[in-house]
Image (tube, rainbow, N blue to C red):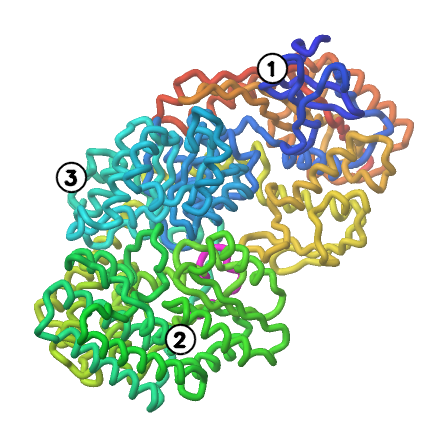
Amino acid sequence: MTMTEFRPGTLVAARGREWLVLPGSPAGMLLARPLGGRDDETTVLLPDQDSPTAATFDVPSVDDRGDAARARLLRDALRLSFRATAGPFRSFAQLAVTPRNYQLVPLMMAAAQDTVRLLIADGVGVGKTIEAGLIAAELIASGDAQRLAVLCSPQLAPQWQSELRTKFGINAELLLPSTANRLARSVPFGSTVYEHYPYLIISTDYIKQHSRRDEFALLCPELVIVDEAHTCIAPTSTVGSSHAHQRYILLRKLADDQSRHLLLLTATPHNGDDGAWQRLVGLLDDRFAELPVDLSGPDRDDDRKLLAKFLIQRQRADIRDYLSEETPFPTRERAEESYKLTPAYRKLFDRVLSYAHEQVADPSIGHVRRRVRWWSAIALLRSIASSPAAAEQTLLNRSQLDDAQSVEDADSVAGPRVFDVDLDDTVDGDDTALGAAISTSDGPQASARRRLRGFAAEAAALRGVKFDAKLKRVVAIVSALVADGYHPIVFCRYIPTTEYVAEHLATALRKLPGIRVEAVSGTLPPEERESRVQDLTAHPGPRVLVSTDCLSEGVNLQEGFTAVVHYDLAWNPTRHEQREGRIDRFGQTAKTVRAVTYYGADNKIDGVVLDVLLRRHESIRRTTGVSVPVPVDSTTVMNAIWESLLLRGTDPQQLSLDLGAATDSETADAVLTRWIDAAEREKASRSRFRQAALHPDEVEATLADVRRSLGGPADAERFTRDALALLSGQLTDTDDGFIVRIDTLPHALVDQLPATKASALRFHRSLPVPPGEPLLARTDPTVEALARYVLDAALDPLLPDVARPARRAAVIRTTAVDTVTTLLVVRFRVELVIPGSRRTITQVAEDAQFLGFTVHNGLVRWLDPATTDTLLLARPTANVRDDLARGQLQHALDRLPELQAHLGVRGKSIATEAVKAHRAVRRSSHVALRGLQARLLPPPDVLGVYLYLPDRTT
């Protein structure tokens, strides 16, 4: 045969093994994958060098006999090794992640849309990245998208890159300020970065710049994922000037292309600002731009139903036991710890506060300089409350506001930094202080500079546990956490504080066996932060991470850490929730995590933040069951407090902890009312949109289709147990699976397993799983390697019996049948042609089935699937003589040619069902009607023949 005559799905022999020809072969060559091999083993066969020839799949021999358990093992190994199946989703067989039941809901919502527009607003730690990745992988696999862009902060970019590569096989490049030039150098003449690289993870703030925004909007990929989408919607009060508004302009341009797929991810879709909410959902569909926030009442039923097609919003309670699959989350234990300033520190604090009051209250300065001093004073007092190291740096560094030309300039630079809110990711310094030193251009300020230098010298002298009570107490707190078996993260506000605390903790804890302390801050590029965290996570002993808020949002830290200490209070309650969400999320293996709020007992500024913002935020969360940001943003409250402190000269020791007294009663009432209203609306929204427009029965039916094609968790566990036991593995049961000693397994198998230094494999039945330990799922590398080994060994009759746990034939005498019954294991191949909106995909899908039959008066009667499945549970009740077994089996093998017609009919039925399954999940989409084609690729392969003889002696 010539190379062009080998159609996709054909078996060829080359290089001493069999290969499956795949679609997309280059001219004069064959694109092929080893039979039973992995996708990464796909290669091109050359006619002159490889001389591929047509291969036929031999039927079993009479000498290749086993029992029913080995027959089932063969079928399971076959299904678990499939890289493409006839099930409803084209991407699933190639995923390296096992999605939870609840994570299929956004995918099914996406499948029902022509152009996918979804707001995935599931809670913190539920797995929005996985949900978005599933949709992206399916759109790419089905030809509805060829290019992908993920918009996120630079801090999250390496994590997105890792998740897409390792779980979904999507190899994306990072387009960040630090990588842009390198990527551009590799782009051929006449192209652009956006066109040359099909998959990009892009810094939102890098690409939103006016100089890049329009070109990106013009050349943007057809699929865009926006992480932390709420940061792209400016509060109504700041529209037109904020960084968030610039991001929104970008997203609005992208959303205006009605053919673009757009996934918006956020755990906080509504912050109490109705206008911001309307702008967010308006990106999904222009009809939502005027949608009222209150959708209650019968007259809004149509609006609710429409929005439910675009919005999914669930919390842990909604998915913890979804469709009978338990998804465990840790229990969060909260504690408060406090300290009191030493006399020396108290003295410095009071002197600096007095200086700040003088500077702000100076009647001789104009509005702009007053605003500059206002912000510098607040930043200075926050730094002193943080640590002597942060105080010293702030006192010596020139204020970043010194060149401000207007009040608006000063506010736009200082506000986000001081109040822990929206900051442009392209600007360094989210964890740096503003600086307090002012220009010496005018004479009177020279004296102020000298005073600041004097304060800096005093701050430097306060370093260490002798004068810094805050540092001394945190050593005890962290020591206690480590002693209790926790691995804490200590969150600090400023870079100098992070380095200072990490240095002293490393010294103070050095006597603890195996302890390791590391610091991570904005001084490190995102890739190095991730590398340092991974390094520390892999440390086998006690570990402590000291970090700024560069790791507080979106980063997965649950694998290595189990406690959070808020060394510096955030002035934004949402930031505390984000910090704790790094460890309190799906995938956390600890049953309990701890969160310690740490504050100055005699520092009334800390007291106000704690009482007015943090405790009130937690109280509303407990009352309503939901967590929402302060609806007027925390700057409103904190501005009022600082107004009282700096302009009115209120003594911080007398500063009231009551919101009304700290601000004014009108402000207090408005804040509390809007906060509670926002929480109640969020509660109603989550109840309304937790199931989206799908009924659980629909999800369950789709799950059944997927598991029928690929095998479910129970199949993976049964296969792994049976295979290892038949390979002489010594298994010991655990609460969540079992352990098998590696030294009891065949060397040929061990060589194929993922490398490990452990002496045993500890298999887990459910997530989360400790790093390096296998999960009983088809996508786990260890299970995948075992399935591939079992299948290859079954097809190699030259291997010794002990190395072949699965057999291709058996003759069993049993009371489970009353007539001779034959069971076949058959592999079918189906060519799928999927006309996606962007390109047509051709794929060879595989399916494995048990087919049973009996013969009466020369007529073959095929058994129904339920009866066939019961045969796999049949136990031998008597022995079969060797000569009888050989004769009966040979008779069955001789009958195979006359069964080919029925196998062909069955294969065509599988092709028809593949089309139905594809259309079922895309029932509301015109995509389903574009003409998916499926045809059987003959001949089917008979991998196993098993005979059941009736036992008439009992």
Mark 1 vs mark 2: in front: 2
Mark number, residue 458:
none
Crowd rating for badge 3 (residues with CA inside 10 Å; few <14, some 14–19, many 20+) = few
Q: Looking at the picture, how far across and down is residue 830, in whole percent?
A: 59, 20
Would you place residue 384 above or below residue 128 in this image? Answer: below
Picture quadrant of residue 925: top left
Question: What residue sits right under mark 1 in the picture?
Answer: 905
Say which label, 1 or 3, has the lower sequence index: 3
Q: Nearer the viewer, residue 375 or 116?
A: 375
Q: Is residue 313 left or right of residue 30?
A: left
Would you place residue 459 above or below residue 212 in this image? Answer: below
Callout 1 amino acid: Val
SS class of the residue under badge 2? helix
Q: Quadrant of the N terminus?
A: top right
Magenta part, dominant SS:
loop
Mark number, residue 389:
2
Would you place residue 891 above or below residue 244 in this image? Answer: above
Question: What residue sits right under mark 3 in the picture?
Answer: 290
Q: Is residue 208 visible from the viewing direction of this image?
A: yes
Question: For the magenta stretch, what is the residue range?
Answer: 583-597
Q: Distance between the Cα atoms at labels 1 and 3?
A: 55 Å
Say which label, 1 or 2, has the lower sequence index: 2
